[in-house]
């Protein structure tokens, strides 16, 4: 089996040190600099209620970030490492270090965009993403955040269908029942389970699914790390033969690239950036997360921003570490042959991976109705359709059927779905829209009576250049991500 040279503990420790140092200092994203809550203010707040609220909201945000999209990260990262090695960019350790920096930079940019949305909500009094856009940028293009949310939720649905199909097939194979085609399995699950769940008048009973999702992905990361360290999938390992058969079948279906090494590296970096953005995406829910927080005494009076700074830092640091652990375990175990859905690379006979599959399968099963409801409601709003259309059983069936059809479209795997979702939707929600809203957040647009209304964000040294740079980066990532992912 093809393998990278490993730098196990070093890369994980470097990444963990960066993230833990950020969380230890309570760094947020207020203004142009990282925000630290003054000690005098910390002491004046009731620690019990504040810490409880912060912990609950941090867990809620982390559950929003971590999802099925994490499964495509190892494949995307492995292709970047392989392309960089072919281009002679540097040693394996150098390339992995560059990946560490990429994760830290993208994690920080995503957290910064999330914080900016909260700051816009606090200054304008907006309670939804679309309302924040309207109050800062006007109503002319207010449909754009909703359209981006439609794209992100739909690509998330497609990812869930793909994972459900793979997971159900692998579980049956481990039980000696591998004769049923994946399409029939998914059709049965969609008709008998997903359709009734999506028809529920309220999805509040499925709230536990987000907890299950975070636990499932955490267990997955621990299992993958254990299999990386114990060498079960190395030559001579207990699961090497089973995994090698799978990887050989995958390799036979992959045509060699006709691109030059440098062009291939550029393409893979663009695609991976889009996949990474999609994995970190939780920004359409930023106003709801922000409004969960309790206002605390602040230099500006009563503010949620110091709390938001802590919550954002800790949640994105935790999510980033889970993402990195899964990425490195997949990259170092399977190299560029890692499947677009990393669990497909593992042996069906591996008992620990079987546990991870069941947990992740249940997580995705109950995550799908949440995404489908968001997709259906937002699509009806964007298209200005009557409200009754949203609740109609035919609409539910159509949205499920469309996601199933796209999931089984030839050449449209989990990696391409995640890349397109990140490029088309997440780029706007994460980078472009928050930066544009902040740039247009003049004192005149702040809500009446807001203590900091006289402060223009653009007057903070370096802030305007930073915001313009983030908006430009988002535009480039979106354009290149779509263009390059469609060529694969």
Image (cartoon, rainbow, N blue to C red):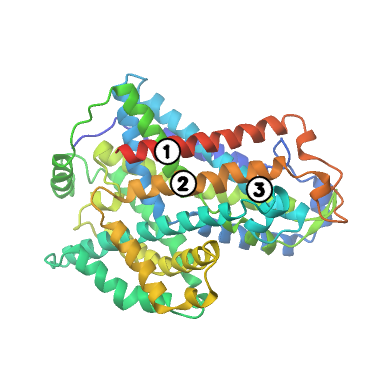
Disc number for residue 381:
none
Q: Are marks 2 and 1 in contact (CB under 8 Å)?
A: yes
Q: Is residue 319 above or below residue 192?
A: above
Residue matched to label 1: 481
Residue plotted at (68% across, 54% down): 134
Q: Are the residues tagged 2 and 3 within 8 Å (C-beta)? A: no
> Where residue 476 sits in the image (x, y, percent)?
50, 34
Horizontal and vertical percent for residue 67?
Answer: 44, 56
Say which residue appears at 71% left-offset and 35% top-offset: 33
Instruction: Tell me if I can see residue 456 in this picture.
Output: yes
Which residue in the protein does label 3 denote?
115
Q: Residue at x 42, y 38 (%)?
A: 481
Mark 3 burial class by Cα count in 10 Å: few <14, some 14-19, many 20+: many
CA gap between label 2 and label 1 equals 8 Å
In the image, is 408 to the left or to the right of 435?
Answer: left
| Residue 179 in the image, given as x and y percentages of width and height | 11, 66
275 vs 144, nearest the viewer: 144
* Residue matched to label 2: 424
Q: Badge 2, how many Cα within 10 Å: few under 14, some, many 20+?
A: many
Mark 2 lies on a secondary structure that is helix
């Amino acid at each position: 089996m093809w393998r990278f040279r490993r730098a196990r503990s070093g890369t994980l420790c470097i990444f963990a040190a960066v993230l833990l140092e950020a969380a230890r200092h309570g760094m947020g994203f207020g203004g142009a600099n990282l925000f630290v809550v003054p000690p005098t203010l910390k002491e004046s707040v009731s620690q019990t209620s504040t810490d409880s609220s912060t912990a609950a909201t941090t867990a809620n945000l982390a559950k929003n970030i971590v999802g099925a999209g994490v499964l495509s990260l190892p494949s995307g990262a492995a292709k970047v490492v392989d392309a960089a090695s072919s281009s002679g960019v540097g040693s394996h350790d150098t390339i992995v270090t560059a990946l560490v920096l990429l994760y830290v930079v993208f994690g920080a940019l995503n957290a910064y965009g999330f914080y900016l949305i909260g700051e816009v909500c606090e200054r304008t009094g907006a309670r939804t993403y679309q309302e924040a856009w309207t109050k800062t940028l006007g109503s002319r293009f207010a449909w754009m955040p909703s359209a981006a949310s439609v794209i992100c939720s739909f690509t998330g649905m497609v990812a869930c269908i793909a994972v459900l199909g793979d997971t159900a097939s692998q579980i049956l194979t481990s039980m000696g029942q591998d004769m049923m085609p994946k399409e029939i399995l998914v059709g049965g699950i969609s008709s008998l389970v997903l359709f009734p769940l999506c028809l529920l008048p309220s999805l509040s009973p499925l709230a536990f699914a987000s907890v299950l999702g975070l636990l499932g992905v955490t267990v997955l990361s621990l299992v993958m790390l254990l299999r990386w360290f114990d060498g079960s999938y190395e030559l001579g390992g207990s699961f090497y033969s089973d995994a090698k058969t799978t990887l050989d079948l995958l390799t036979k279906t992959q045509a060699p690239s006709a691109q030059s090494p440098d062009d291939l590296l550029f393409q893979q970096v663009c695609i991976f950036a889009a996949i990474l953005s999609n994995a970190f995406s939780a920004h359409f829910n930023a106003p709801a997360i922000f409004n969960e927080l309790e206002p605390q005494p602040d230099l500006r009076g009563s503010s949620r921003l110091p709390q938001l700074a802590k919550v954002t830092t800790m949640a994105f640091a935790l999510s980033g570490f889970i993402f990195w652990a899964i990425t490195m375990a997949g990259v170092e175990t399977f190299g560029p042959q890692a499947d677009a859905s990393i669990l497909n690379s593992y042996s069906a006979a591996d008992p620990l991976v079987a546990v991870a599959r069941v947990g992740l399968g249940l997580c995705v099963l109950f995550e799908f109705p949440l995404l489908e409801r968001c997709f259906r409601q937002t699509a009806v709003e964007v298209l200005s359709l009557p409200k009754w259309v949203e609740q109609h059983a035919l609409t539910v069936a159509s949205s499920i059927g469309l996601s199933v059809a796209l999931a089984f479209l030839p050449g449209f795997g989990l990696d391409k779905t995640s890349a397109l979702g990140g490029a088309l939707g997440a780029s706007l929600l994460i980078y472009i829209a928050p930066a544009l809203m902040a740039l247009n957040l003049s004192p005149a647009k702040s809500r009446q009576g807001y203590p900091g209304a006289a402060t223009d964000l653009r007057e903070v040294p370096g802030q305007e250049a930073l915001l313009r740079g983030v908006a430009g980066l988002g535009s480039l990532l979106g354009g290149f991500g779509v263009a390059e992912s469609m060529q694969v």
